[in-house]
Amino acid sequence: MLKQVQFPFLLFVIVCLHCTTTPARSQAVSPAPSGPTNITAILEKAGQYTTLIRLLKSTQEADQINTQLNNSNQGLTIFAPTDNAFSSLKPGTLNSLTDQQKVQLVQFHVLPSFYSTAQFQTASNPLRTQAGGSSDGEFPLNVTASGNQLNVTTGVVDASVANNIYTDNRLAVYQVDQVLLPLELFGTAASPAPAPSSTKPAKRVSGADAPSGSSDDASVNTSGAKGPHHPAAAAISVGVAVSVAFCSLLL
């Protein structure tokens, strides 16, 4: 009977010792999604970026961004306006741009370096964009940090960073509440000059300077003007003068 009790007990002790000496198996970590970085796929997953995606594809800037990210160590920062931001533009704004200007507009939303939120705290403005350099003043973009809030200024609009959509230490995508309109394309310097006012009074001209058929002919001042010289009138005047002189001699 004792042997029957001891055997199960010994078996239990052996099992307990085995469990305490065997290390616990660590939980497996899911691998990162495979495949190259794709900016349009990132925006499609985030939602509400249909217009921006269409611009990226039509200007072929999506391919340019993906090539830079997947074939070099160069980081990028992208400011992504939402569909609501595009809908707040004046009607026909995008259609009024040439193909080259659309490329510049998209490139103006891309910085050719990676910037985390903290790095904007010490960034030197103006920042260089894909549309132009900061040294020669082309397409200047200023990003300032006030606490955790980022503000973007173009010289035409002042936008705010509403959300951090994506970051992987090489690409940062930030949501902005307005389309970043560059000064070179939408500034007052590029606007046509206003037409002269139609209420300005017309300049009065003298009768000698007035053009033939001019509407100002009726307003020309004719007071004191001499009548036209007629040869017959001059002959009569001379005859009267001679008669008066001859009569004076007879008297």
Image: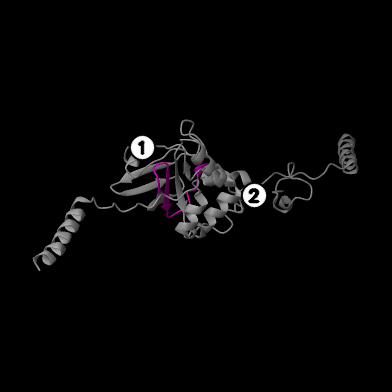
Expressed as whole percent of the image width and height from the top left, the position of residue 147 reads: 28, 47
Is 189 left or right of 248, judged from the image as shown? Answer: left
Tell me which residue sits at (58%, 50%) in the image: 57
Q: Judge whether 84 appears above or below 146 on screen.
A: below
Using the image, tell me which numbered label, if any, was put on residue 140. none
Is 74 left or right of 93, judged from the image as shown? Answer: left
Secondary element type, mark 1? loop
- Residue 246 visible to an observer of this rendering: yes
Q: Which residues are magenta?
A: 167-185
Is 215 left or right of 165, judged from the image as shown? Answer: right
Q: Judge whether 32 appears above or below 128 on screen.
A: below
The single residue placed furthest to the bottom in the displayed view is 1
Q: Nearer the viewer, mark 2 or mark 1?
A: 1
The amino acid on which the numbered mark 1 sits, given as a three-letter code, is: Ala
User: Residue under circle 2?
Assistant: 202
In which quarter of the view is residue 141 placed? top left
The mark that comes first in sequence, 2 or 1, is 1
Is 111 left or right of 9, judged from the image as shown? Answer: right
Q: How is the image coloured?
A: one colour
The front one of 251 and 205 is 205
Q: In which quadrant will I find the N terminus?
A: bottom left
Judge whether residue 173 is colored magenta: yes
Judge whether residue 8 is colored magenta: no
User: Residue under circle 1?
Assistant: 123
The front one of 124 and 193 is 124
Cα–Cα gap, marks 2 and 1: 57 Å
